[in-house]
Image (cartoon, rainbow, N blue to C red):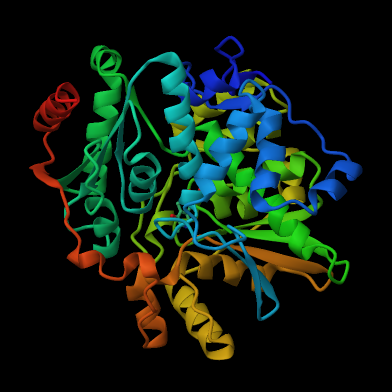
Amino acid sequence: MKYISTRGGIAPLSFRDAVMMGLATDGGLLLPESIPAISRETLAAWQKLSYQELAFAIISIYADDIPPADLKALIDRSYATFTHPDITPVVAKNGVEILELFHGPTLAFKDVALQLLGNLFEYLLKESGKKLNIIGATSGDTGSAAIHGVRGKENINIFILHPLGKTSPIQAMQMTTVTDPNVHNIAARGTFDDCQNIVKTLFNDLAFKEEYSLGAVNSINWARVLAQVVYYFYAWFRVADQGKKKVVFSVPTGNFGDIFAGYVAKLMGLPIDKLLLATNENNILSRFINDGDYSLGHVVPTVSPSMDIQLASNFERYLYYLYDQDPARVRNAFAELARDGRISFSKNEMDRVRAEFLSLSVNQQETLDIIARFHKETGYLLDPHTAVGVKAALDLTGPDQQAICLATAHPAKFGEAVTRATGQDPPFPPSLVGIDKLPSRCETMDADLEQIKQFVKEKVKAR
Ligand SMILES: *Cc1c(COP(=O)(O)O)cnc(C)c1O
């Protein structure tokens, strides 16, 4: 399987090279040259597989340059850190099937992809004899999942900037209590945008990027999308045959990453009737689907902070398919966005979008109301991101459809909102019990480019 760029400016790459490249060097995103259709017979055979076996069956199609035994071992190692035997179990509550994606080390769905990506990086670096220094900015979830994905790994350092005092206390502790020598937390006196800008500036310094082998772990890496395709199949197998209803997936979305993985599953032939795209008040993607309006707004902070995003980076991958895999049209669309702050779509394009997606933007009061209602009626606690998805599932699912809602975080991770909605603190899962007593390591600095660059240089040289 070869990989190409949505902007058409690179020669086809192997899976290994696509993983190491992350963002395509022409500014586009990497995609497989073709998405293979899965036959009915294969689907039937996959139905019986365990999570790890299914992951191997799907990922090996796209990672055909990794020897099967090695890939199997990488997958097994990646999901050994999950605390549930089904890895991503499905539970039925109030007629909605909840796909729990939060049984990994940092209690959010990003672990599903980043545990695998960390192991893949380590494996590929060992073979090439190279080193990688990952640098990223986080408002909470991605940073902690990335740190747990690469802690203790050979030939990798990770530097994660977070805005001092602006993540939840639990999110900060999940990062700073990882004291492996290759993990470097930086709490910057500033905002998430300050952190993000520093990281962007470091990556734009091409000489520095080259000399220090900088790498990224944000959701643009194809391997992350690929790892997430697996749980759509896994959940569908657990739900689809009950009652013969058509299956829809409701996905709480920020960067369009998780829902794009569902779209890939659909392209592979998994019978998904519709993808329900659920946003909070940061609703550019809902406006796109419901009104054909893809215009940038301002980010507003909400009780579901991991979806407080305007520019959805993975949206470009979907546009590539909407534009019939024509990179020139993708380039034009992003030129229009840079020039006018919006992308416009024809009626025909919007008809095609709406044949695949429905969408709902859920405000904060509605989010808290759903958490309270689910708790009262079923005793089940939803985290605020999952609650956005559940609201969309309840409002948009027809009588002939069965909704599966992706539960993207454990309620204890966003306990404040859950307590506000229910008057009750969510119980701590074992991984959080006593976390405030653990030793921690974190460098507090001004949000100053030169200071942070100096810190990275020193730490890289010291190893
Ligand atoms: C990152 C995140 C999301 C959004 O996922 P995307 O891939 O950006 O759409 C939703 N919920 C939680 C808890 C997250 O951490």
Q: Where is residue 25 in the image (x, y as percent from the top left)?
A: 46, 16
Where on the picture, by quarter, is residue 64? top right
Residue found at x 36% / y 64%: 431
Q: Where is residue 52 in the image (x, y as percent from the top left)?
A: 64, 47
- Is residue 216 left or right of 27 when viewed as pictured? left
Residue placed furthest toward the right: 41
Q: Where is residue 154 in the image (x, y as percent from the top left)?
A: 34, 29
Q: So how many labels did they put on this image?
A: 0
In the image, residue 203 sits, relative to residue 287, either above or below, namely above
In the image, residue 27 sits, relative to residue 91, either above or below, namely above
13 or 5, which lies in front? Answer: 13
78 or 198, which lies in front? Answer: 78
Q: Where is residue 43 in the image (x, y as percent from the top left)?
A: 84, 46
Residue found at x 44% / y 14%: 128
- Is residue 205 left or right of 57 when viewed as pictured? left
Q: Is residue 160 visible?
A: yes
Specify the quadrant that holds the N terminus.
Answer: top right
Residue found at x 22% / y 33%: 198
148 or 72, which lies in front? Answer: 72
Where on the picture, by quarter, is residue 239? bottom right
Q: Is residue 343 visible?
A: no
Where on the picture, by quarter, is residue 278? bottom right
Residue found at x 33% / y 44%: 147
Specify the quadrant that holds the C terminus.
Answer: top left
196 or 13, which lies in front? Answer: 13
- Is residue 48 left or right of 40 when viewed as pictured? left
